[in-house]
Image (spheres, rainbow, N blue to C red):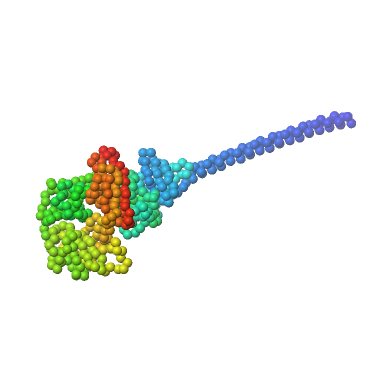
């Protein structure tokens, strides 16, 4: 018995030890396995988190916006959304794709301030990923017939009205300007979205023509190229589109002619004491007016038109009136020995405004005579055609007050009105150009909107910039 115990007990002990060893080994294995699994899970979590961060960093946003600032040296571009609710700045790199509306490649220099673009960029880094001219935006080029009314928030373009929000901009090349800087002699590119104007780009600006020693031609006419015709008055300073022009002045049977170059924001002068004055030829004009008992005034003088009327070559103002009919005011250019002009008056309707009547002249001509345009009385006509103009409404009691800058010469639509501070009679309702000039300073023009009301208009403009200051 004792011998059995001696054998069994050691065996049992060995078995127990073995089992304990197996247990601890298994437990350690499971522990290591669990730790390994935990490490794998941790690594997976970290990797996923890195991927999430990377996703956030690479998340892109698209916006339709207008370019309002460009710093090519720093590689920074500023935008404002077309809705006007977001202003943001992005960084552009050398490899950033810049595309036209149809996917053609462009350079940054080809993108003007005021361009409407589809902008793709990184939310996190603010890096610009892609820039493309929006195919939903519209563009009008070579715009010369327009009216801007900031106060009413509208812009009329060739007879159509568009909303003009406060976020709309004006640009001269790579510089921003204001809508008051735009005159009716400028040529524009207008960009918009829907029925809203977003930007106005001045493609062809204006300079100024000053007449010296012009007393002989006061009361006569000046023609600048084919499009600007106006009465000559004392000390004129006329806004003129930049470019080269042939200038012709006529009065009392004599004419003076000179060529002139107009540069943007610069003054050019014609000294009439140094220009040859020549006697002008005479043209004989036959007026056919319906009804034939209407009154004809040529250059302010009532004129009998039963026979041909001798008129000097050049521009003449024609006014035709008859009770019960809408009056006609137009300008004609005589440049041939014989010409025929037909004018048909329209009967007034009950809906005509008694203070601002529409005047229509059906003006046909033969030879080379033309009905042409003068500032404030714009006609669109070739050698034969119809024209419509609006008679000016002038208040004899209400005034425009120009308070500053003090000491500046003030001109209204090219005509001298005095030195600021100055007051003058309120002109016709609509857009007019105030030009300010002062020796040693840059000449500046502003467009103002005059309303047809019983109120005075008070204006104060920025201080003038010295000529040697950029």
Labels in figure, total: 0
Residue 344 vs residue 189, the one in the foreground: 344
Can you see residue 248?
Answer: no
Which residue occupies the extreme right position in the image? 1
Residue at (36, 52) in percent of width and height: 151
Front residue of this view, candidates 404 and 369: 404
Q: Position of residue 287 (x, y in %)?
A: 17, 66
Q: Residue 335's quadrant in the figure?
A: bottom left
- How far across and how far down the image is residue 388, in percent? 26, 62
Q: Residue at x 30, y 46 (%)?
A: 403
User: Looking at the image, which is closer to me, 443 or 45?
Assistant: 443
Q: Position of residue 220 (x, y in %)?
A: 16, 54
Which part of the image, by quadrant, shows the N terminus? top right
- Residue 240: where, in percent of width, then height? 24, 50
**With respect to residue 277, does 16 lie above or below?**
above
Along the line of sight, the residue nearer the viewer: 244 or 22 = 244
Identified at 64% across, 36% down, the residue is 35
Tell me which residue sits at (47%, 44%) in the image.
123
Residue closest to the far front = 397
- The quadrant of the picture occupied by the C terminus is top left
Residue 387 visible? The answer is: yes
Q: Residue furthest left?
A: 279
From the viewer's perspective, is 15 left or right of 159? right
Q: Name above or below for residue 328 compared with residue 2.
A: below
């Amino acid at each position: 018995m004792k011998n059995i115990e001696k054998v069994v007990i050691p065996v049992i002990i060995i078995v127990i030890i073995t089992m304990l060893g197996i247990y601890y080994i298994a437990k350690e294995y499971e522990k290591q396995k669990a730790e390994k699994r935990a490490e794998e899970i941790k690594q997976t979590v970290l990797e996923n988190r890195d991927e999430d961060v990377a996703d956030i960093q690479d998340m892109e946003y698209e916006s339709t916006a207008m370019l309002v600032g460009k710093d090519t040296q720093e590689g920074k571009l500023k935008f404002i959304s077309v809705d006007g609710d977001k202003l943001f700045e992005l960084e552009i790199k050398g490899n950033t794709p810049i595309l036209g509306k149809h996917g053609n490649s462009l350079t940054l220099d080809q993108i003007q301030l005021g361009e409407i673009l589809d902008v793709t960029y990184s939310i996190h880094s603010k890096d610009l990923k892609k820039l493309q001219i929006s195919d939903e935006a519209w563009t009008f080029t070579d715009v010369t017939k327009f009216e801007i009314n900031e106060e009413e928030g509208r812009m009329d373009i060739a007879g159509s009205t568009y909303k003009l929000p406060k976020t709309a901009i004006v640009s001269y090349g790579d510089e921003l300007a204001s809508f008051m800087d735009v005159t009716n002699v400028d040529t524009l590119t207008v960009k918009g979205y829907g029925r809203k104007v977003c930007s106005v780009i001045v493609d062809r600006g204006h300079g100024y023509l000053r007449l010296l020693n012009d007393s002989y031609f006061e009361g006569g006419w000046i023609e600048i190229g084919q499009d600007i015709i106006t009465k000559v008055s004392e000390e004129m300073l006329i806004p003129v589109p930049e470019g080269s022009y042939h200038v012709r002045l006529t009065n009392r049977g004599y004419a003076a002619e000179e060529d002139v170059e107009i540069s943007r924001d610069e003054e050019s002068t014609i000294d009439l004491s140094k220009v040859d004055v020549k006697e002008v030829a005479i043209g004989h004009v036959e007026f056919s007016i319906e009804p034939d008992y209407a009154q004809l005034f040529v250059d302010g003088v009532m004129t009998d038109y039963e026979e041909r009327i001798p008129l000097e070559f050049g521009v003449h103002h024609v006014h035709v009136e008859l009770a019960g009919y809408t009056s006609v005011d137009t300008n004609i250019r005589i440049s041939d020995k014989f010409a025929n002009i037909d004018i048909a008056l329209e009967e007034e309707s009950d809906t005509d405004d008694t203070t601002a009547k529409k005047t229509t002249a059906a003006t046909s001509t033969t030879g080379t005579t033309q009905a042409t345009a003068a500032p404030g009385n714009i006609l669109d006509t070739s050698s034969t055609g119809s024209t419509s103009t609006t008679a000016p409404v002038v208040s004899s009691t209400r005034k425009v007050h120009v308070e500053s800058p003090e000491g500046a010469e003030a001109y209204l639509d090219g005509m001298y009105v005095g030195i600021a501070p100055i007051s003058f009679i309120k002109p016709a309702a609509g857009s007019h150009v105030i030009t300010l000039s002062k020796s040693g300073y840059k000449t500046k023009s502003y467009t103002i909107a005059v309303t047809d009301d019983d109120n005075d208009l008070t204006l104060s403009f920025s201080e003038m910039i010295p000529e040697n200051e950029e």
